[in-house]
């Protein structure tokens, strides 16, 4: 290897390592801090020693506390329920509509598709406050329905499905149609098995969105029965802002679930995001 | 798949029906509702809400904070995301692992990020003050300091954001043909020339998308303010989105909140239109320039090829 290129590789690694350290630091620090007691955290903050960063005596007590004293299990289960329901229902609603947009010709198709795309360029945060009024009129406030139903139809996911269905080989459906298969059979028997990747991408995106949602659950689901994990975190932060180790532990638990899903399916998730940007 | 297959006449409508109804009720209705509610004053149609809002000094202060923050945060995030994408686009060994690590904050919620960083930025026992003490720096106020709080929030939002925007830019970079760089390198084009003459123009569309989407996201940022600063100290982090949230749920003044959200939506559209225009103009200028200097342009193109 030439000296110049070796130097270049070396500096690339240096820059990468520095970057990764900065990006990873809050997570690693949070992980380390979650195994310590509040007392230890405050005591070793200053002056800076190795024990500012690493536990003197590692303990799991803050994790236990999070579940026994602060009852985080309920919001976690609530959020899992809401996220999984939204993934299943959202995939059904969006893939069916996308199937129609990709396969059929019908009146107003272009207009309707355009309206759907434009409506989703308006971010959810900006309509969360007026959406409350709508959901309130429908009598859905403080129910799981308030969290699931408005998030089922997602323009981005619909767009991803449409794009994927359009790229399937031509003639596939015609052949089945000539053989006399009905549309439901075609959808279930031919389309679904081919569409695993896009369903994984869509499911992952919906799940992570729902799991991480904060503003909408904060507005629409405040009662303990339907409390979501991110809202529970927010409430905890406002009520017990000095319980640091518990806050770190809760943060780590809340972050772990989407991370655990993301890592094995990283390829699909990244592909999905990138596609929506380039084709969109 | 071709879109010319004929099915039953009603079938397509049946299939898109659920999605369309959901979008109509939960997306389009709220938008219209906002517009209408903003024009409701004491129960009847009128401009009273806007009149009050535009006379309110706290609205202007909040608007100014919003604009100020966004003038810093969006360019900062774009530059960092482009830099990261360029860095990660290299082909050194183990680059996949680095990429994965940089993606990690993308899956983490803004709530978790806010809590983690909130404690790290704590003025008394926060780890960042501990680290600064290594360099002999005094304790900083961070979130409790009028001048620093907004910067802390910018750090939090950027930590979450850059990895996400990098994904789009990296995908754009991967679409560029390597051969273009090869010939540019042979012609002796330096790193900066290649960046500004080849790379950035080639990912222009992705860049525009990221710019618009990032601007929108940042204009609507409000979780760190709600959880950490409550708009303070002294209103220094009181962005419009948080003011709108407070109007609806603390002051129970829904028309005011609707009016603020409308202003925000207008602001977002305005910024996006300006960005689209700027990108278009640049394009036209370049075409004009190339027409004026056909030989030079042809030479350039030939070289790039």
Image (cartoon, coloured by chain):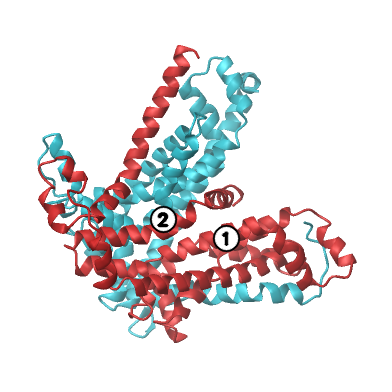
In the rendered view, would you say B204 is above or below A219? above
In the rendered view, would you say B239 is above or below B69? below
Disc 1 chain ID: A
Question: Residue at 36% across / 42% down in the picture?
Answer: B76
Disc 2 chain ID: B
The quadrant of the rendering that contains the C terminus of chain B is top right
The red chain is A
Q: Position of residue A241 (x, y in %)?
A: 19, 64
Name of the residue lying farthest toward the top: A3
Q: Where is residue A52 in the image (x, y as percent from the top left)?
A: 17, 45
Residue denoted by label 1 = A202
Question: Residue at 39% across / 57% down in the picture?
Answer: A256
Question: Residue at 32% across / 52% down in the picture?
Answer: B67
Q: What element carries label 2?
A: helix
Left or right of B60, for residue A91? right
Left or right of B161, for residue B227? left
Mark 2 and mark 1: span between their CA atoms?
21 Å
The quadrant of the rendering that contains the N terminus of chain B is bottom right
Residue denoted by label 2 = B217
- Can residue B62 be seen here? no
Q: Chain B is drawn in which colour?
A: cyan
């Amino acid at each position: 290897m030439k000296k110049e290129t070796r130097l270049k590789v070396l500096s690339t690694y240096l820059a990468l390592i520095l970057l990764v350290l900065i990006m990873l630091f809050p997570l690693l620090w949070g992980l380390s801090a979650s195994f310590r007691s509040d007392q230890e955290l405050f005591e070793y903050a200053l002056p800076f020693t190795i024990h500012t960063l690493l536990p003197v005596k590692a303990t799991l007590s803050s994790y236990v506390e999070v579940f026994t004293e602060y009852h985080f299990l309920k919001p976690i289960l609530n959020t899992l329920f809401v996220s999984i329901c939204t993934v299943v229902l959202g995939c059904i609603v969006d893939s069916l509509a996308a199937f129609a947009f990709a396969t059929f010709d019908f009146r107003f198709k272009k207009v309707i598709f355009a309206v759907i795309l434009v409506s989703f360029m308006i971010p959810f945060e900006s309509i969360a406050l007026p959406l409350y009024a709508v959901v309130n009129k429908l009598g859905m406030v403080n129910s799981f329905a308030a969290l699931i139903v408005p998030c089922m139809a997602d323009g981005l996911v619909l767009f991803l499905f449409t794009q994927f269905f359009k790229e399937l080989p031509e003639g596939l459906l015609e052949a089945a149609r000539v053989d006399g298969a009905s549309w439901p059979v075609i959808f279930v028997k031919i389309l679904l098995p081919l569409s695993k990747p896009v369903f994984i991408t869509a499911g992952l995106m919906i799940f992570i969105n729902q799991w991480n949602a904060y503003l909408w659950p904060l507005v629409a689901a405040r009662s303990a029965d339907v409390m979501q994990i991110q809202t529970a975190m927010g409430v905890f932060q406002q009520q017990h802002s000095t319980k640091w180790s518990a806050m770190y532990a809760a943060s780590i638990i809340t972050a772990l679930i989407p991370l655990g899903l993301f890592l094995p399916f990283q390829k699909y998730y990244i592909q999905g995001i990138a596609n929506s940007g380039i084709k969109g | 798949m071709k879109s010319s297959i004929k099915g039953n006449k009603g079938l397509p409508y049946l299939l898109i029906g659920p999605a369309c109804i959901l979008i109509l009720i939960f997306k389009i209705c709220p938008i219209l509702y906002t517009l209408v509610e903003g024009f409701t004053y004491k129960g009847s149609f009128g401009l009273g809400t806007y009149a009050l809002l535009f006379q309110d000094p706290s609205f202007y202060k909040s608007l100014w904070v919003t604009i100020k923050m966004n003038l810093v945060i969006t360019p900062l995030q774009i530059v960092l995301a482009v830099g990261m994408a360029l860095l990660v686009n290299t082909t050194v060994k183990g680059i996949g692992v680095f990429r994965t690590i940089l993606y990690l904050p993308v899956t983490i919620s803004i709530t978790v990020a806010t809590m983690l960083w909130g404690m790290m930025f704590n003025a008394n026992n926060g780890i960042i003050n501990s680290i600064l003490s290594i360099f002999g720096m005094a304790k900083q106020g961070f979130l409790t300091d009028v001048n620093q709080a907004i910067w802390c929030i910018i750090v939090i939002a950027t930590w979450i954001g850059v990895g996400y925007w990098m994904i789009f830019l990296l995908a754009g970079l991967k679409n560029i043909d390597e051969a273009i760089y090869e010939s540019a390198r042979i012609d002796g084009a330096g790193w900066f020339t290649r960046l500004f003459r080849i790379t950035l123009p080639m990912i222009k569309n992705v860049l525009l998308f990221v710019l618009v989407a990032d601007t929108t996201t940042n204009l609507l940022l409000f979780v760190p303010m709600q959880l950490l600063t409550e708009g303070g100290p002294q209103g220094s982090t009181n962005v419009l989105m948080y003011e709108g949230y407070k109007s609806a749920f603390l002051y129970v003044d829904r028309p005011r909140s609707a009016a603020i959200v409308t202003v925000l939506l207008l602001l977002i559209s305005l910024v996006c239109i300006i960005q689209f225009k700027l990108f278009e103009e640049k394009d036209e200028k370049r075409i004009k320039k190339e027409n004026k200097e056909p030989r030079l342009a042809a030479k350039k193109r030939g070289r790039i090829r």
